[in-house]
Image (tube, helix red, strand yellow):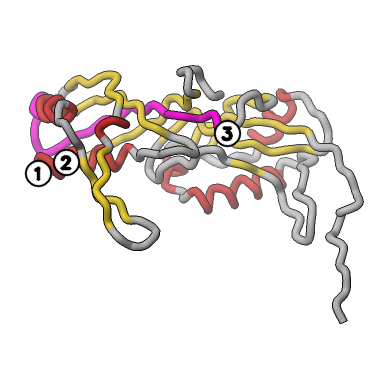
Amino acid sequence: MAQNITPKLSTLIIEKFDYRAVYAKTGRARYISHLDFMRSMQRIIKRSKLPVWHTQGFNPHVYIMFPLALPLGTDSRVEIMDFALTEKLSCEQVKKQLGEKCPEGIEIISISQPVHKHTEIKSAQYQVRLRTNVSGEESLEKFTEFMQLDKIEIEKRTKKKTVNLVDIKPHITLLGARAQDDELLLDLQLPAGNDFNLNTNVVIDAFLERYGLQCEQIYILRTKILLQNGEDFT
């Protein structure tokens, strides 16, 4: 005989106060996968002794939300994490308690109440430092030519396990490019968010493959997360 089971805490109303953390993920921490990083942040929040809000239902757990995953191997000082508390605390106090429990490579930059929704994120900016098997000047010349192509097509696997060609040229905004010593320095703006994401590594790989270049060293830093109107999401 079927029984009606009432979820735990279903009749208990717990007040919820939303917070948004801007944090840096740099150094060795940039090699932590997104899934592992989510688990790490859950442990950090628990160790901070903050009155964290849990989801309601059969399996309550710490509520945290990351609006934009950071590509593996990329540094950033503008990452976003949303979470909630059961008490209204000052942003300074939350920053202090959370920051004290963060390991090397993770730094809480600021805490505030959320203003914009995750769905409003449209793009992100990156700094790329690339060293190839040719000089920085030659890499710059080739990347300038690369950005003048009519199409930049990459292979993309669909859910049906077929492969389609996708033109990423319209989605790449080159904000700046220069050669310094033996390196190519790029400032790029790429789509990010719910609608479409373009990984910096995809752009660089397409460039290297096009000209048969070898990557000897690369460093990528995410510098901004932007709204449709160009304002900072943070």
Residue indicated by mark 2: 208
Q: 10 Å neighbourhood of mark 1: few (<14), some, or many (≥20)?
A: few
Decide which of 182, 74 is in the foreground and name it: 74
**Extreme residue in the right direction:** 11
State the image coordinates of residue 50 (x, y, percent, origin top left).
76, 39
Residue 81 position by quadrant: top right
The structure residue drawn at horizontal position 16% and vertical position 23%, both measured from the top left corner, is 181
For marks 1 and 3 on the same chain, the one whose residue lies earlier in the sequence = 3
Residue at image location 17% in from the left, 22% down from the top = 179
**Which residue is at a point 35% across and 26% down the rendered structure image?**
189
Q: Is residue 204 left or right of residue 69?
A: left
Q: Which residues are magenta?
A: 119-138
Residue topped by disc 1: 212
- Any part of residue 182 in sight: no
Q: Is 178 situated left or right of 35 in this image?
A: left
Element type at marker 1? loop
Could you say where residue 36 lies in the image, as x and y percent from the top left?
Answer: 53, 53
| Front residue of 31 and 145 | 145
Q: Disc 3 marks which residue?
A: 118
Q: Amino acid at mark 2?
A: Leu
Q: Position of residue 22 (x, y in %)?
A: 57, 29
